[in-house]
Image (cartoon, rainbow, N blue to C red):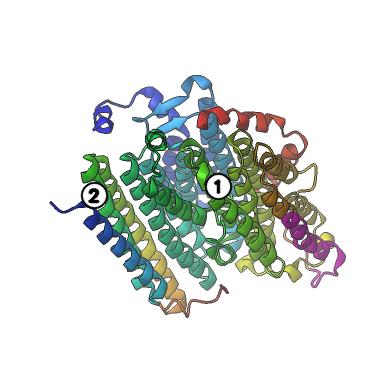
Amino acid sequence: MAALQTMQGVPQAGDYIRILPEIVLSIFGMIVMLLDPVLDERRSQRTLGGIALLGAIAALAATLYQAQPRFWGFGFFDTVKLDAFSVFFHFVVIAVTILVILSSYEYMEVQQIRAGEYYGLVLFGTVGMALMSSAVELVLIFIALEISSISTYILAGFRRRSAISSESSVKYFLLGSFATAFFLYGVALMFGATGSTSIARISAALADYAGTGHGPMLAYLGVALMFVGLGFKVAAAPFHIWTPDVYEGAPSPVVGFMSTAPKAAVFAVLLRIIFEAHFSETVWLIWLAAALSMTIGNVAALVQDNIKRLLAYSSIAHAGYLLIAFASLPANGIPAAMFFTASYAAMNVGAFAVIGHFAGHGERYVMLEDYAGLGKRSPVLAAILTVFLLSLIGIPITGGFFAKFYVFSAALQGAHPLMGLVIIGVINSAVAAYYYLRVIVVMYMREPREDAPVAPISAGLGLALGLSLAATLFLGIYPNPVLKYAALSVGLLH
Amino acid sequence: MVPLSYYLVLSGILFACGVTGFLIKRNIITIFMSIELMLNGVNLSFVAFAARWQQLSGQVFVFFVMVVAAAEAAVGLAIIIALFRTRETLNIDQVNLLKL
């Protein structure tokens, strides 16, 4: 009853500041949806995209505003918690949204898709993802997860006339809802074990259990089921089957979006659940998922000829590397995981922006052999893609290097270093280098199959590419500020 | 009074029925209905646990689950219609352009 009694009050101004970016994004999302039927169908794309871009930039400003520590704390009856951790993920998610909107601009025109609700859905999806990273109550986490998922289900099928796009959307939708049901069952069992859905109170109730000696079986089952549901959303093996199919069929900028922003948000939820509720006993589960994801992702990527499928398997493998940080000690694991999500977001959004641009009308050019001779046909595009691919391998002076470095070194610290997992991870990184380098070799060493020049890069796309390139290199050359900010949240979660 | 475990077992059976249906049925609409069955199994355990803990929050959660399930159904059916328009089939075995 305690929860209900605290709900009698009225939200204060501070509460609204704690969800300011979400409010801004929702308002702009609604403006886009309202303007869509009013504007001329053929020319609405630029206007609506501009409004969405404005909204995302305003939300980023709102995030910077709420980053002042005086606003930090609980809001809305202890369902939302603003701290360095949620600010960090707000920033990552909204920055990804800006890049995606910028690169969608040209893509939608080339594909001749009616923009309409596209930008609205991107903004609404971002609301869910931002809310996920600040939610500390399982009810709110569930709703935020669904806001983000439902938007991405629709976005995956946005090339409506294309059969593979709607197929990808149906597969994503069915398997996504299936996973959500598992997550919910986990929440139900957790509620049954502890009598609460607030993460802090669950954590306290579990600490009481520890005194009595008998293990809370129901809670363990609950957290395992929640891990199944969330593992699906981040495409960790063995829940990764949907990933290549969905990524192949969905529009490229959308793939760039859904392989980074929702993943970052779900990893934020996982960090909160695993570290705040002290589920370190489930490490073996994470260990297994990490090892499987890295191995399956990298081995399957070796034989892919479609670049979108290749990057889909690479994204499974990256979920595996990231899970290593979850199995480590919180003091090192949390900042390593946060840094990893940020740098992965920067390079992956950029890579998919290049792929979306090169794919052309109807996404015709997505096979590896289409990339033959790209180094000659469009040196700039090839050079940019090369940087992102090198970063995905983990070559120094790119963000990918420090991402992997911090994760591996976090795993090796503490009383029980995860030597086995790190060895698997390092071997996998070496295997992964083969298929990324294969793309680079095809681009530079092979003769072009056709000499037709690649379409020039538009201003919006150029800006998106420049920003993600800058972020990737910045994280690779000067990672300290980001890492220091991420380290602020260690005490907050633990 | 019916013991708590009866409700939990029933909710487990409902959830398992849903999982089985999801895995063996071939029609997309039926698969979708199986997911709804899983969610209803979850709802039953929420209500049972809410009675066990004397906490209303469990029952409130059920309302949220139902609302979200309704939203998901609206979007899901639209996606299924879009698929039917391009493929003219709802058999999941024939929806196989993307290799699994």
Question: Compared with residue B50, is residue A40 higher up or lower down, i.e. above or below?
Answer: below
Residue interval drawn in magenta: A427-451
**Image position, residue A483 (x, y; %):** 66, 33
Which of the chains bears the disc numbered 1? A
Of all residues shown, which one is farthest toward the left? B1
Residue under numbered circle 2: B47
- Distance in Å between CA atoms under marks 2 and 1: 31 Å
Of all residues shown, which one is farthest toward the top? A70
Question: Compared with residue A99, is residue A355 higher up or lower down, i.e. above or below?
Answer: below
Is A363 in front, or is A234? Answer: A234
Q: Amino acid at mark 1?
A: Val
Mark 2 vs mark 1, foreground winner is 1
Query: Which residue is depicted at the point 42% across and 79% down?
Result: B89
Picture disc at residue A304: none
Q: How many marks?
A: 2
The question of residue A422 being in magenta is answered with no
Residue under numbered circle 1: A283
On screen, residue A469 versus residue A285, left or right, reads: right
The question of residue A444 being in magenta is answered with yes
**Image position, residue A395 (x, y; %):** 79, 48
Q: Is residue A117 visible?
A: no
Q: Residues within 10 Å of mark 1 (few under 14, many from 20)?
A: some
